Amino acid sequence: MHPILARFLTADAARETLRKEKAGEPLTPEEQHFVAAADANPKQKAMLLGVSGRALSSDAQAALVLLAAHASARALREDEALSAATQKAREALKEEGASDEESDAFLASILLEEAFGYEQEVDNFDVDYVKESLGEVPALASLSKESVDALFLAFAKAAPNDADRKAREHMARALFDIAWSEGPTSINPEHLETLLDNEVVQESDEAQDARVRATVSLLQTLAHQGLIGPMRLSRLRAQLGDDDA
């Protein structure tokens, strides 16, 4: 987990930073990032300030997580190991018409996935995984409906037989609807969990096997296109129970 994300997941730290800002007291660089994130997301800031005590409602807790993640995303520009990849990612998003707020949200989602998306030690920040995820952004940002349609058709056509083609078509269509219905973003464990729940677990053993194989092949195809990095591919395949992950 990014250290700024970890710091501001507590309501006390967040409120104290906003109090210091309002009082005109000096802020550390981390606190400046949090204040900037709060100012850019006034609805979440107001929600956080509108409740008292340490026990937050689910909405207030969600607001706190969002602000902490956005503060972390802003700090990536100053991270020696991640600044170059962050800049390339932001430039790619801007070139495709994303606003600064939308770019912040995209990068924040990467940090939230690194923190909470996998069963791993949250006290450590996986710099390499975040760097890889940032490197996926240009390819994702350049995706259009036409390129996704072409990818879909090529993937289905490459099936060795008619049964596999049907499984590929079904799973590719389903995953793209789940992950990319509101625009391309990194394929993550939540997307796969939804896919498995909706399209696999209720099927016969034979159909389950076919659909999982199709999904593994789809992830490999996306990796060949630069849309999924090697570490992400390995983690997602492991989530599917792929012994070769």
Image: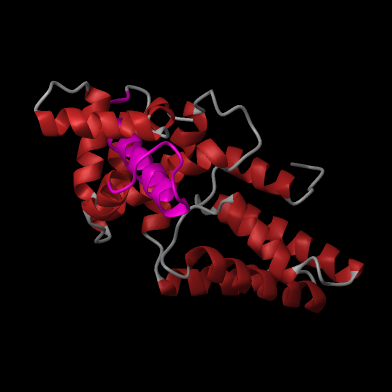
Furthest residue in direction left, as rendered: 24
Q: 30 above or below 116?
A: above
The part of the image, by quadrant, that contains residue 231 is: top right
Query: Is 21 included in the stretch rendered in magenta?
Result: no
Query: Is 53 included in the stretch rendered in magenta?
Result: yes
The structure residue drawn at horizontal position 54% and vertical position 23%, both measured from the top left corner, is 123
Please indicate, yes or no, whether residue 84 appears anywhere in the rendered image. Answer: no
The structure residue drawn at horizontal position 33% and vertical position 43%, both measured from the top left corner, is 67
Please indicate, yes or no, whether residue 49 appears anywhere in the rendered image. Answer: yes
The structure residue drawn at horizontal position 34% and vertical position 34%, both measured from the top left corner, is 72
Q: In the rendering, at what x and y percent does residue 205 appear? A: 90, 66
Viewer-side residue, 3 vs 100 = 3
Q: 173 above or below 105?
A: below
Q: In the rendering, at what x and y percent does residue 163 appear? A: 81, 76
Q: 192 left or right of 128?
A: right
Q: Main secondary structure of the magenta part?
A: helix
The part of the image, by quadrant, that contains residue 204 is: bottom right
Q: Which residues are magenta?
A: 50-79
Furthest residue in direction right, as rendered: 205
